[in-house]
């Protein structure tokens, strides 16, 4: 009688083992970091192109969008570099009893405000490039972008964004 239970238990263990090996061998392949970076580089203009197609922009409008986009990212890049420098100095001020902390916080706050202002002005100027028919689509796309970024911020745990 005991032998029969042992045979049943061993049989069940073999079946479970086969299934676990099967899941282990057939697990989805996780792309390497290099593949992920390559995918990002290949698709980095995908959003911009979708924007062009959705709004059906003329070549002149596309050129203006691209010019404003480059100008915006240059401006934002400079502000982000200042923010990173201020953060580095702020961390270093721990050693100096935090004497420069208040002025660095003012610089950080001012630069964050300038980024928000530049972003608003950027989208406002992009909207001005659109004709009346395209403005409705532009408003719809930007509204969707804000909602999507808000969800992304919530997943990260940030409390900023639209409520």
Image (tube, rainbow, N blue to C red):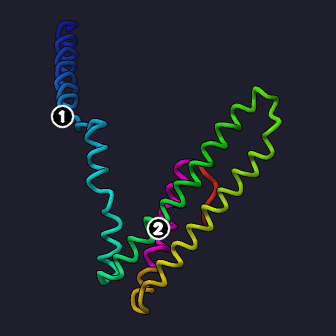
Q: Disc 1 versus disc 2: distance between alpha carbons?
A: 36 Å
The nearer-to-camera label among 1 and 2 is 2
Q: Quadrant of residue 59?
A: bottom left
Q: Which residue lies at the image location 47% right of the left edge and 63% below the top edge?
A: 148
Seen from the viewer's position, the closer of residues 72 and 161 is: 72
How many numbered marks are there?
Answer: 2
User: Which residues fall within the magenta stretch?
Assistant: 139-157
For residue 76, side relative to residue 27 (left or right): right
Q: Quadrant of residue 32?
A: top left
> Is 33 placed above or below 126 here?
above
Q: Which mark is residue 26?
A: 1
Instruction: Give the image location of residue 23, x and y in percent.
Output: 21, 31
At numbered mark 2, what does the secondary structure look like: helix, strand or loop? helix
Which quadrant is the N terminus positioned in?
top left
Q: Which mark is residue 145?
A: 2
Instruction: Give the image location of residue 63, x and y in percent.
Output: 35, 76
- N-term mark: 1 or 2: 1
> Is 35 placed above or below 144 here?
above
Q: Which residue lies at the image location 47% right of the left edge and 73% below the top edge?
A: 142
Q: Which residue lies at the image location 57% right of the left edge and 73% below the top edge?
A: 121
Disc 1 crowd rating (10 Å Cα; few below 14, some 14-19, many 20+) is: few
Instruction: Give the image location of residue 24, x and y in percent.
Output: 22, 28
The chief SS type of the magenta part is helix
Seen from the viewer's position, the closer of residues 122 and 148 is: 122
- Outermost residue on the bottom side: it is 132
At numbered mark 1, what does the secondary structure look like: helix, strand or loop? loop
Disc 2 crowd rating (10 Å Cα; few below 14, some 14-19, many 20+) is: few
Residue 30 falls within the magenta-colored stretch? no
Q: Which residue lies at the image location 57% right of the left edge and 48% below the top edge?
A: 81
Which quadrant is the C terminus positioned in?
bottom right
> Is 20 placed above or below 45 here?
above
Instruction: Give the image location of residue 74, x and y in percent.
Output: 49, 59
């Amino acid at each position: 009688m005991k032998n029969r239970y042992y045979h049943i238990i061993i049989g069940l263990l073999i079946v479970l083992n086969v299934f676990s090996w099967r899941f282990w061998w057939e697990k989805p392949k996780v792309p390497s970091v290099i593949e992920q970076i390559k995918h990002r580089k290949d698709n980095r203009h995908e959003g911009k192109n979708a924007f062009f197609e959705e709004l059906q922009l003329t070549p002149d409008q596309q050129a203006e969008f691209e010019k404003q986009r480059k100008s915006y990212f240059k401006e934002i890049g400079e502000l982000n570099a200042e923010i990173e420098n201020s953060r580095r100095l702020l961390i270093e001020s721990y050693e100096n009893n935090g004497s420069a902390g208040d002025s660095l916080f003012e610089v950080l706050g001012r630069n964050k405000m300038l980024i928000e202002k530049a972003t608003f002005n950027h989208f406002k100027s992009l909207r001005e490039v659109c004709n009346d028919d395209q403005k409705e689509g532009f408003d719809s796309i930007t509204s969707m972008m804000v909602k999507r970024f808000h969800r992304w911020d919530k997943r990260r745990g940030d409390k900023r964004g639209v409520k």
